[in-house]
Amino acid sequence: MNRSTTGLRRSLGWRSPKLRKRTELTILLAPGLILFVGFVFIPIVIAAYYSFYNWSGYGPLNDAIGFRNYSYAFNDPAFIQAIEHTIYLTVASVVIQGPLSIGIALLLNRKFFGRAFLRTVIFAPYVLPPAVTGVMWSLILQPGGFADQVLKAFGLGGLVQLWLANVHVVLLTVFLVLTWQYIGFGIVLLLAGLQNVPIELKQAAAIDGASPWQVTRRITLPLLAPTIRIWGFITVIGSLQIFDIVWVLTEGGPAGASSTITSYMVLQGVDSTDFGFASAIAVILFAFCLVFALVYQRFALRRDVRGALTRAVGN
Amino acid sequence: MRSSRALAAVALAVTTATAAAACSSGSSSSTSTPAGTSSAASSSASSPSTAAKVTLTWWNNATNQPLLGIYTSAIKGFEAQHPNIAITNVPIQNELLQDTKIPLALEGNNPPNIYQQWGGGVLGQQVTSGKVDNITADVASWIGGISGASGWQANGQQYGVPVDLHVVGFWYRKDIFKKVGITVPTTLAQLESDDTKLRAAGYAPIAVGSKDRWPDAFWWEYFALRDCPQSTVQSAIKGESFSASCFGQASTNLAAFLKTNPFQTGFLGTSSQQGAGSSAGLVASGKAAMELQGDWDPSVMEGVSTNKNLSSELGWFPFPQTPGSAGSQTAVLGGGDGYSCTGTTTQAQACAEFLQYLDSPTVQAQIVGPGQTGEPVLTSESSAITLPATQTAAAYFKTASYEELYFDTALPTKPGQNLDTAIANYFSSPTSSTASAIANSPATP
């Protein structure tokens, strides 16, 4: 009798769709949620807590200074410079890498001999660890190094620069290396997006007399737009947080000419052991990323969630 | 990869970027001879005679030979004399050790019993963690014979002991100097005229690794030592302000020197120790004629070059004099590698005994001889130095009017780093505003 009651209760419980859904959600979401809370949420909260202290990393947290770390940061010209450099890299990534990626992806989407090989070659740099990329390019870009020799060999000796030592050039150098490393990722992402553009639509347009340019402009690009928006999101967040290549190539130098928010943060935290201040920088960077993510979500990505696809085609 | 605080001891870990966790084969197999039944002679009367065995973990940056082997055999020798004490050797890549592992360990609950540091204000900051043992009483009987030991004090108490010392000076290529027909300069004016001749002969006169920032700081600090009396230098470091006018004079003199274009092309982007394109690599390969560096430089050069004759081609001379200026003309800039202890009283005692062993004549001869780490802390052992250039440096070291610890180590970490950054900015653009940034740098928030 006892057994049958439990059996009844259990079967009743499982029949309740609400409870079942909850159990399912708990089981499926728990692992991810625990990781997210443990390694993302809690560290952010702790960083925010540290940022209100003057703390060298040694000894107890006993010197609470309110928002002073934040006001120091925004009064430090070196930090303002780092923000400017980060914005420069972000805007340049979107404005230059974007059209370049789309163009190359469109080319690589056509059928031609050696396409698979070219796709591999273009994606290859992305596979390299950024630190390796940094070391490799710092060798290539040495004064009189490989880059200079190649330029001279093509009669472009006038373009030779002190790539990593000239304070007016170094940020551009960093951007070129970043582009070399990350453009393959954008191209592969967009190529995947292009596979989702129905061939029938293009054929129908062609039959209706649309030129190839019109097909690309009116059919392919609008249908690729969701992928482009996702690419934009990843690129902006990635650029705001860019660190490894910058650190290996220049450490943010010379004289801070290629500093980024993260390189400034590491300099202040790890090298100067001012962990309270570095935490404040981390929180500021987090705020930048969060604001961007929310705004982008609200104004750009929401269209995709709502089904921009059908409407775009319907128009 | 950087190394602003990676001054001195970098030499030992040198250019390899890989943490040699896999190389830590030196961990000692503990011989479990019961105390008392051991016939091993104990050199130290203060050895604890209790039966409990003490195991100490030793963090150092000797990831490469020859120092790794020297340390391993030092452990064996020490354990033979002290059957109660076992030492586990944990060599860790230098930057990882100094910048990440030690600060984290001191903040955690289980710091290594013996760990490497460079003394000065940085050690003082580590002491504030409350984990570093005060070993004043444990070393009192022998610390008097150790050169430079006062650099490892905080609040007048001994919190560490040096095992080797460093001096910063010019490492130059004797063969290039001979070919160009110049001699070792004793004044700054002579150095400048040598530079002109070297430049005309197609060499980069002086190499500098400005990317790392601290090599730039050596230059400014030496100008400061020449332009400021010792008392001014020391009170500036203590008060964390370089606003005295002689420091401004040092900046001005440095700017005038920078104007003579003494460095290699693109020096602002050059690292000091990584690969053939580094400043050490440029001197080793004969593209540059000299470099202002610490006495770890020869071993760094060995690591980044295939030049077999380097040790005979390398010479040393002190930073030139600037006649008429107010500071000491024979003061040297330097530092050293030392160790601190953490843990219980028993562990601290055992640690102090081990440090005494490292500072004993036999081990000192090994460390500065085949180990090539610099100068010994026992003046009697400087004869063990094998490299001719380092012998010259050690001989000069003895006659120097005084030695000043690298400013970025003498200061607490943040002011020290601020100073290095301000000096590096001055190298990039020597203006009055960057000069005043140096003066105020330690106080920068």
Image (spheres, coloured by chain):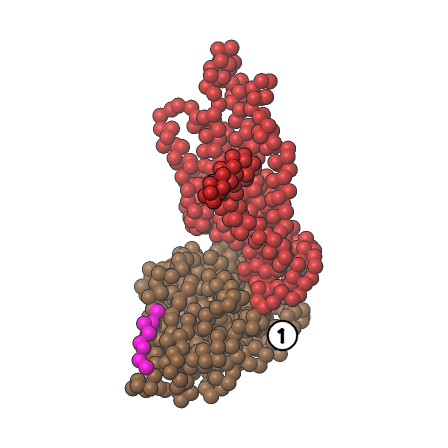
Residue B65 in the image: above or below residue A118: below
Where disc 1 sits, the SS reads helix
Q: Residue at 57% of width from left, 26% of height from top? A: A307
Q: Residue B336's spot in the image, x, y percent?
A: 47, 73
In the rendered image, the residue lying farthest to the front is A1
- The residue singled out by tag 1 in the image is B238
Q: Residue A32's spot in the image, x, y percent?
A: 50, 45
Tag 1 subunit: B
Is B398 magenta? The answer is no
Q: Residue at 55% of width from left, 47% of height from top? A: A241
Q: Is residue B257 left or right of residue B94?
A: right
Q: Looking at the colours in the rendered structure, which chain would you say is drawn in brown?
A: B
Crowding near pointer 1: few (<14 within 10 Å), some, many (20+)?
A: few
Q: Give the range drawn in magenta.
A: B27-34
Residue type (three-letter) at the residue carrying disc 1:
Lys
Residue B386 visible here? no
Q: Residue B271's spot in the image, x, y percent?
A: 47, 57
Residue B232 in the image: above or below residue A56: below
Q: Residue A263's spot in the image, x, y percent?
A: 55, 53
Q: Looking at the colours in the rendered structure, which chain would you say is drawn in red?
A: A
Residue B240 visible here? yes
Say which of B336 and B87 sits in front.
B87
Which quadrant holds residue B73?
bottom left
In which quadrant of the rendered image does the C terminus of chain B lie?
bottom right
Q: Residue at 51% of width from left, 59% of height from top? A: B212
Q: In this view, does B382 lie to the left or right of A197?
A: left
Tally of numbered discs: 1
